[in-house]
Image: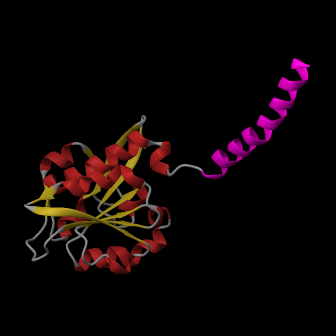
């Protein structure tokens, strides 16, 4: 009798367990939730760029960081809005396209950097306004972006296109160049 009771109880639990497993597998976590340390480091770099790169003075009331395309950070980057740059509060904007990036001091392109053909509009906007363009993969800087994150030996590293940065209205600190791989053209990779 007791044996049948526990057997029936297990049969009732089984559908709930299968439903739970289905839900967990269906609703996959964001990229940042899968790699929280990597995206915490990238968020810290984005903030620290404000210390090692100088932008020309502007009349904006905020310092704007724009995440274009699929947001890989999720809520990990949100605490950056408690910080300031030259007494201006930092504001995050999550944008679907590059059309609204004119007001951004830092433009972070995630999914767009995987297809260099989509970068043309962003890099044109960045050349018209003093925006730091940041992406993922070394090919981003080789396609005209300014700074790229990439993985090397399990660590987040920087790849900087020095030519593009020097041609912009932005000034970069030598200290930032010391911790990065520098790209100056086709011969240096």
Which of the 4 image quadrants contains residue 14? top right
Horizontally, residue 106 falls left or right of residue 149, namely left
List x then y, in percent, for residue 69.
45, 67
> Which quarter of the image is occupied by the N terminus?
top right
List x then y, in percent, for residue 147.
30, 57
Please report the residue visible at 16 percent of the width from the left and 62 percent of the height from the top: 89
Q: How many marks?
A: 0
Is residue 5 in sight in this rendering?
A: yes
Please report the residue visible at 39 percent of the width from the left and 66 percent of the height from the top: 143
List x then y, in percent, for residue 172.
15, 57
Whether residue 168 is situated above or below residue 174 in the rendered picture: below
Is residue 157 in sight in this rendering?
A: no
Is residue 109 or residue 142 the one in the foreground? 109
In the rendered image, residue 169 lying in the magenta stretch gets the answer no
Please report the residue visible at 36 percent of the width from the left and 49 percent of the height from the top: 76
- Residue extending farthest to the front is 1
Residues rendered magenta in the picture = 1-27
Whether residue 126 is situated above or below residue 109 in the rendered picture: below
Is residue 117 or residue 53 the one in the foreground? 53
Whether residue 59 is situated above or below residue 21 in the rendered picture: below
In the rendered image, residue 14 lying in the magenta stretch gets the answer yes
Dominant secondary structure, magenta: helix
Please report the residue visible at 46 percent of the width from the left and 73 percent of the height from the top: 118
* Figure colour scheme: secondary structure
């Amino acid at each position: 009798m007791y044996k049948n009771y526990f057997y029936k109880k297990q049969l009732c639990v089984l559908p709930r367990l299968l439903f739970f497993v289905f839900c967990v597998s269906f609703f996959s976590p964001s990229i940042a939730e899968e790699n929280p340390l990597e995206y915490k480091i990238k968020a810290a770099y984005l903030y620290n760029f404000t210390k090692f790169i100088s932008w020309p003075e502007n009349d904006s009331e905020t310092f704007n960081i724009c995440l274009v395309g699929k947001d890989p950070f999720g809520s990990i980057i949100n605490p950056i809005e408690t910080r300031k740059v030259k007494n201006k509060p930092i504001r995050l904007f999550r944008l679907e396209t590059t059309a609204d990036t004119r007001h951004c001091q830092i433009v972070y392109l995630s999914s767009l950097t995987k297809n260099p053909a989509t970068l043309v509009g962003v890099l044109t906007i960045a050349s018209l306004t003093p925006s730091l363009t940041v992406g993922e993969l070394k090919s981003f800087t080789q396609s005209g972006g300014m700074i790229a994150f990439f993985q090397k030996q399990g660590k987040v590293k920087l790849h900087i296109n020095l030519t593009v940065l020097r041609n912009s209205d932005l000034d970069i600190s030598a200290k930032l160049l010391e911790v990065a791989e520098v790209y100056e053209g086709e011969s240096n990779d």
